[in-house]
Amino acid sequence: MKIPNDFVMGVATAAYQIEGTSFGKCGPSHWDSFAAKGGTFQGQNGDIACAHYEHWQSDLDLIQQGGFDAYRFSVAWPRILADGTGQVTPEGLDFYDRLVDGLLARGIAPHATLYHWDLPQALADHGGWENPDIAKWFTEYALTVTDRLGDRLESIATINEPWCVTWLSHFLGHHAPGKTDLPAASKTMHNVLYAHGLATQAMRDAGHKNLGIVLNMEYAQPASDKPADVKAAQLYDGIYNRWFIEAITKGRYPSDVLPYLEPHFPTSWQDQMPLIQTPIDWLGLNYYTRSIHADDGTGQFPFGKSVAGPLNKTSMGWEIYPDGLEYFLNRLHKDYTGDLPLFVTENGMALHDQISANGVDDTTRATYIQNHIQATLNARKNGVPVNGYFAWSVMDNFEWAFGYEERFGIVHVDFETQIRTPKSSHKMLQEINKNR
């Protein structure tokens, strides 16, 4: 496999999953309380994680040794503003200062994400993403970070995976704060986009450049050609895939989903749509799997349920479907983004890796990654302006509700000793990067 020289090859992580919130002066987040209430596997949390706060230099060395062009990381909101607003924690900004400078010293481009799910607990106590004030809270935080780091960042993403921030966390209840409430989910589905738009405009007014957002998408296929199953898949596509991108690029919400969510919106929501449509400079796509949908027989929104498919699966039960990545890149380019630069900002595979005297053989993951890079390059050859691919993840880490049971890393982490061991997937990518 030959990678074009102008195609960015990177790796990605998130702050709460690797840093260790017990290091430095990081404030509490709603993931800490969610874990304490049993929302995660065995109540596991990010107190220690990969201790990246202490091991960041050797972790960056591993990225450099892999020959990667870029590193996508997130900034922990509670590490910068322990209460979400107000008093800044200097040690937090100092840490990211060192991280960014360390990347640049190694010839690695820093791509920062401002929000990857670790909401300060103090703001969660005031309604979190349900509170319309979240937009100004987030904008204050965004400006605090970018005023310090923005001059050295290759790109800035406002929010990672709004669907997870909203629907997964407030309707399905799988992520913090663990709600299963349609009115709550509906409010967040709008507020997260308003926060993105307000912060993007404020950062642009402050002179910051290369601003974007990262959306996750999942190929939704009906279980049969029955109208009810087709409707279930279509609504899932609307909630998951079309909701956020239509608002950002067209200034509207999907007409098949809006009637169910609008009754719970703030009264001024339509006045906020132009700001939500604030132009972005690039779009990130996170893609992992497809899902198959059937009518659930309840007669209630969203009418559908996921059913098992026939394809090979990851250890988390996610079907492996590289064609879906090529499909979404083509769909985004054709229907929504036109000439806007696209990046695959996350893609990877969960496996229950075992370490041995010979290291970690994760050939299955290596093949998964190769096939998805090829799907990305196929779209590029088809005229899609996709400019890079970021593998998820640099290292095994705290996998949210799954705790430390699921491993996505191209580097193995022993969570007791914090010893890092590059896997065969790391070596495969190292060879690809070397031979471009």
Image (cartoon, rainbow, N blue to C red):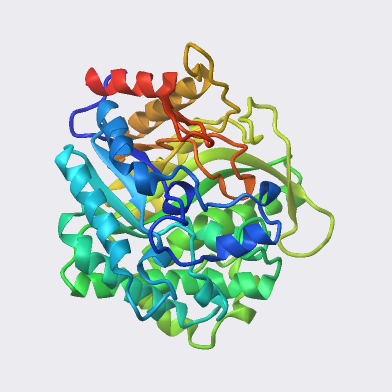
| Residue 327 visible, this orientation | yes
Q: Quadrant of the C terminus?
A: top left
Q: Is residue 222 above or below residue 98?
A: above
In the rendered image, residue 1, in percent from the top left (x then y), is placed at 32, 18
In the rendered image, residue 29, in percent from the top left (x then y), is placed at 52, 65
Dividing the picture into quarters, in which one does residue 38 lie? bottom right
Q: Tell me which residue sits at (62%, 49%) in the image.
A: 44
In the rendered image, residue 416, in percent from the top left (x then y), is placed at 54, 36
Q: Tell me which residue sits at (43%, 18%) in the image.
A: 424
Dividing the picture into quarters, in which one does residue 204 lie? bottom left
Q: Is residue 409 above or below residue 138?
A: above
| Residue 333 visible, this orientation | no
Q: Is residue 267 above or below residue 183?
A: below
In the rendered image, residue 319, in percent from the top left (x then y), is placed at 62, 33
Q: Tell me which residue sits at (73%, 36%) in the image.
A: 308
Dividing the picture into quarters, in which one does residue 7 lie? top left
- Please tell me which residue lies in front, 271 or 421: 421
